[in-house]
Image (spheres, grey):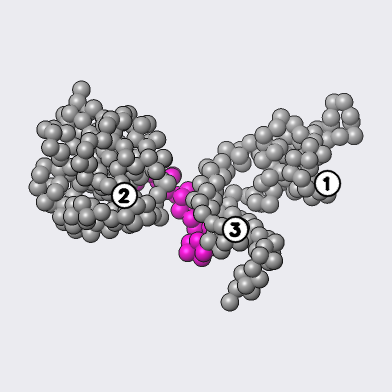
C-alpha cells in the first residue's frame, strides 16, 4: 500500500516532493544515457543564465524565488563544471556578472534536443483531466508506473534521431490485424467505433483493395507502428485519405505526417485528381497538420458515412 497516497489531501506536499525527486532522478538517467555531464537540479539557474546576456546572483534569485545561498550554490557548481564564466560588474566591482562559457554553449547545443524531448513527454504525461491536484498526481504516478519517465524520454529522443529508419510498405495479408487493431485503438481513444468503421476495418479487401484502393504501413525495426488507407470514392479518380492510425507508444514522432506525405506523393505520381478526408474539429492538432499539407475545408455532404465528422477537407493532387 502507498502510505503517502493514503494520506489524501493533507499529504499533498509530500506527494509533490516525491514526484519532483522521482522526475529529477529519471532525468539524470536520461543525461547519463546520452553522456551529458549535467545535473537536472541546476537546470533552472542555467536556463536563466542562458537566456540573459549577463545576469547577477540577485537577479537569478529574484527570478526563481529561491534563497540567495541556493543560487550561490548552483552558480558555484556550474562554475566548477566550466559551464559559466564570472566577470566583474563594470559599475560595481563587488558584483559578479554570470555568463555562459564556451563549454556551456557547447553543452546547450548537445542537450537542447534532450530538453525538447523532456518537455514533450511532460506535456504528454500531464495531459490529464482531473478534479483536484491530488487526483492529477494519482494519474501521473500511474503513468510513471506504466512506463518510466526516463524510458519515455529516451524512446522519444531515439525516435526523433532515427526517423529515416521508418519504412513505408504496402498491404500484405499478414498486416490485416495491425490495420484493424491500430484503428480500433485510435477510435476507442478519441471517439467510438461506428458500425461503418467496423465493417471497413474487418473487410479491407472488400472495401479498399478490391476496389482499387491502397493501404500503407509504417514499420520501425520490422514492427508495424502506423497505417493509412486511400479508399476510392464514388467520384472518379478521387480517393479518401482514411483509416490513419499510429500506435500509442509511437505518437508524437511525426509518423502520421510521414504516412500523409507518402499518400500525397503516391496520389501525385498516379495522377489522382484529389484526396478527400473527413475529420472532427475536436482533433485540433490533426486539423492543423492537414492545413499544413495544403488541405482546404469544403462542405460536408448530406449522408456523410461518419457520425463523428463535422469537417471535410480536400487536396487537389493532379498537376
Tell me the crowding category of disc 3: few under 14, some 14 to 19, or many 20 or more residues within 10 angstroms, Cα based.
Answer: few
In the picture provided, is 107 more to the left or to the right than 198?
Answer: right
In this view, the residue in front, 42 or 316, is: 316
| The label number, if any, that marks residue 213 in the structure image | none
Tell me the element at label 1.
helix
Q: Position of residue 30 (x, y in %)?
A: 55, 54
Quarter in which the C terminus is drawn: top left
Q: Is residue 269 visible?
A: no
274 in relation to 137, above or below = above
- State how far apart marks 2 and 1 are (Cα): 51 Å
Q: Which residue is mark 1?
A: 68
In the picture provided, is 126 more to the left or to the right than 4?
Answer: left
Q: Position of residue 278 (x, y in %)?
A: 27, 40
Q: Quadrant of residue 93?
A: top right
Q: Residue at x 20, y 52 (%)?
A: 196
- State how far apart marks 3 and 2 are (Cα): 32 Å
* Contact flag, marks 3 and 2 (Cβ < 8 Å): no
The numbered mark, 3 or 2, whose residue comes first in the sequence reads: 3
- Select label 3 or label 2 by which is in front: 3
* Contact flag, marks 3 and 1 (Cβ < 8 Å): no
Q: Position of residue 146 (x, y in %)?
A: 47, 64
Magenta span contains residue 88: no
| The label number, if any, that marks residue 245 in the structure image | 2
| The label number, if any, that marks residue 132 in the structure image | 3
Extreme-bottom residue of the structure: 1
- Select label 2 or label 1 by which is in front: 2
Tell me the crowding category of disc 2: few under 14, some 14 to 19, or many 20 or more residues within 10 angstroms, Cα based.
Answer: many
Amino acid at each position: 500500500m502507498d502510505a503517502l497516497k493514503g494520506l489524501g489531501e493533507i499529504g499533498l506536499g509530500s506527494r509533490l516532493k516525491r514526484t519532483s525527486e522521482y522526475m529529477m532522478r529519471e532525468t539524470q538517467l536520461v543525461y547519463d544515457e546520452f553522456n551529458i555531464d549535467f545535473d537536472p537540479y541546476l537546470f533552472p539557474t542555467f536556463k536563466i543564465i542562458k537566456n540573459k546576456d549577463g545576469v547577477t546572483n540577485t537577479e537569478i534569485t529574484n527570478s526563481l524565488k529561491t534563497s540567495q545561498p541556493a543560487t550561490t550554490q548552483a552558480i558555484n557548481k556550474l562554475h566548477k563544471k566550466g559551464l559559466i564564466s564570472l566577470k566583474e560588474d563594470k559599475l560595481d566591482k563587488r558584483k559578479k556578472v554570470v555568463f555562459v562559457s564556451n563549454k556551456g554553449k557547447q553543452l546547450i547545443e548537445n542537450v537542447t534536443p534532450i530538453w525538447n524531448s523532456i518537455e514533450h513527454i511532460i506535456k504528454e504525461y500531464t495531459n490529464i483531466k482531473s478534479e483536484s491536484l491530488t487526483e492529477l498526481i494519482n494519474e501521473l504516478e500511474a503513468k510513471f508506473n506504466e512506463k518510466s519517465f526516463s524510458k519515455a524520454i529516451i524512446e522519444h529522443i531515439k525516435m526523433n534521431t532515427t526517423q529515416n529508419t521508418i519504412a513505408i510498405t504496402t498491404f500484405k495479408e499478414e498486416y490485416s490485424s495491425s490495420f484493424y487493431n491500430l484503428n480500433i485503438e485510435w477510435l476507442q481513444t478519441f471517439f467510438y467505433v461506428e458500425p461503418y468503421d467496423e465493417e471497413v476495418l474487418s473487410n479491407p479487401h472488400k472495401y479498399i483493395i478490391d476496389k482499387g484502393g491502397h493501404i500503407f504501413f509504417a514499420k520501425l525495426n520490422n514492427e508495424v507502428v502506423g497505417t493509412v488507407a486511400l479508399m476510392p470514392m464514388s467520384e472518379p479518380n478521387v480517393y479518401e485519405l482514411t483509416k490513419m492510425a499510429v500506435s500509442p507508444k509511437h505518437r508524437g514522432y511525426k509518423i502520421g505526417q510521414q504516412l500523409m506525405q507518402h499518400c500525397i506523393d503516391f496520389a501525385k505520381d498516379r495522377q489522382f485528381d484529389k484526396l478527400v478526408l473527413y475529420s472532427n474539429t475536436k482533433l485540433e492538432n490533426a486539423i492543423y497538420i492537414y492545413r499544413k499539407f495544403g488541405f482546404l475545408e469544403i462542405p460536408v455532404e448530406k449522408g456523410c458515412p461518419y457520425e463523428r465528422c463535422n469537417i471535410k477537407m480536400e487536396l487537389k493532387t493532379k498537376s
